[in-house]
């Protein structure tokens, strides 16, 4: 049962790999850049760019699930979002289909609903940036492949992944590293009744903006809560997406 983690040299990928390796989970790690430190014992590292379909396809041979984290994570030109986030995700899903990988976990983002006002989730899709549009498309690709191929897909709308809450809105959006590891591992391994599932990924914060639908299916029980940390000041944001929602679109 080997998991492939894409974006394994990034913030979440590095911690996920370390956490899972410590529990003896066999791993294959992929990123376009080498990791800052040696991969954990027992994990192979492969340097590959997901814009290259062939590269990812050979790396998925014999894999039981892909946790797809690779991509651009800050706002930027639309063309870059298409290349890294949309085409990259398409290549991962297509490789999974061709190599009979039964499960792909997609790193989506809470920014897909980021243009909702902070007090009410009124619009089911309200992307707040080109980045968020790329994540909407990521989810749509996942839904398509889950219904037309044998690949099951779990899309995780990751909240704010930080060691601790640092902004007022993190009282609702915070996802701790250890909860993220538990959630992403469950998304990769738990049996599903349906081929496609979308969940929001946060810790067990008392203040909560999003439904916890799907947590039961995955058996996800967060260990952390933003309430265990000092409140980082009063909320001034108008939108759930915070600064992403307020910033101008890049030209
Ligand atoms: N960190 C958060 O709070 C947060 C919130 C919501 C969603 N997410 C999503 O979670 C995922 C991981 O986030 P992160 O914080 O670890 O990001 P990160 O920027 O630290 O890591 C992303 C990694 O992807 C790699 N990458 C980018 N394009 C690639 C390509 N074409 N081929 C191969 N590798 C490529 C980068 O080299 C980098 O190591 C991202 O998809 C991000 O959009 C993160």
Image: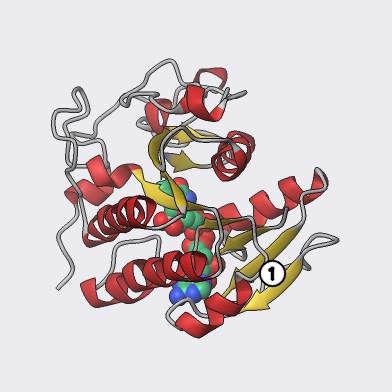
Q: Is residue 126 visible?
A: yes
Quarter of the rendering containing residue 154: top left
Residue 3 horizontal/vertical position (percent)? 66, 56
210 left or right of 34 in image? left
Residue identifier under label 1:
36
Quarter of the rendering containing residue 148: bottom left
Residue 164 horizontal/vertical position (percent)? 55, 35
Q: Is residue 69 above or below residue 44?
A: above
44 left or right of 30 in image? right
Residue at horizontal 62%, vertical 23%?
223
**Display coloring:** secondary structure
Q: Which quadrant holds the C terminus?
A: bottom left
In the image, is the residue at mark 1 within 8 Å of ligand 1 by its beta carbon? no
Residue at horizontal 51%, vertical 84%?
54
Q: Secondary structure at mark 1?
A: loop
Depth order, front residue of 227/12: 12
Residue 239 horizontal/vertical position (percent)? 20, 36
Depth order, front residue of 46/159: 46
123 left or right of 12 in image? left
Q: Is residue 135 above or below residue 224?
A: below
Other-residue count near label 1 (Cα within 10 Å), few / some / many at <14 / 14–19 / ≥20:
few
Residue at horizontal 44%, vertical 41%?
160
Residue at horizontal 64%, vertical 36%?
178
């Amino acid at each position: 049962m080997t998991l492939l983690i894409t974006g394994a040299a990034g913030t979440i990928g590095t911690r996920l790999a370390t956490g899972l390796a410590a529990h003896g989970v066999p791993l294959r790690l992929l990123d376009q850049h080498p990791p800052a430190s040696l991969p954990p014992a027992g994990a192979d590292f492969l340097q590959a760019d997901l814009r290259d379909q062939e590269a990812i396809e050979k790396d998925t041979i014999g894999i039981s699930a892909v946790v797809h984290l690779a991509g651009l994570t800050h706002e930027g030109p639309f063309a870059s979002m298409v290349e890294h986030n949309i085409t990259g995700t398409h290549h991962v899903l297509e490789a999974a289909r061709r190599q009979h990988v039964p499960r792909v976990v997609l790193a989506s983002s809470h920014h897909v609903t980021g243009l909702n006002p902070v007090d009410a989730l009124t619009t089911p899709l309200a992307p707040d940036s080109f980045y968020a549009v790329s994540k909407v498309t990521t989810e749509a690709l996942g839904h398509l492949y889950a219904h037309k191929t044998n690949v099951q897909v779990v899309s995780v709308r990751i909240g704010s992944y930080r060691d601790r809450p640092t902004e007022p809105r993190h009282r609702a959006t915070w996802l701790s590293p250890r909860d993220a590891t538990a959630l992403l591992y469950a998304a990769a391994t738990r049996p599903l009744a349906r081929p496609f599932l979308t969940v929001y990924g946060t810790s067990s914060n008392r203040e909560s903006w999003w439904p916890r639908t799907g947590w039961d299916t995955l058996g996800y029980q967060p260990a952390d809560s933003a309430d265990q940390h000092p409140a980082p000041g009063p909320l001034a944001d108008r939108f759930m997406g915070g600064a992403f929602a307020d910033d101008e679109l890049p030209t």
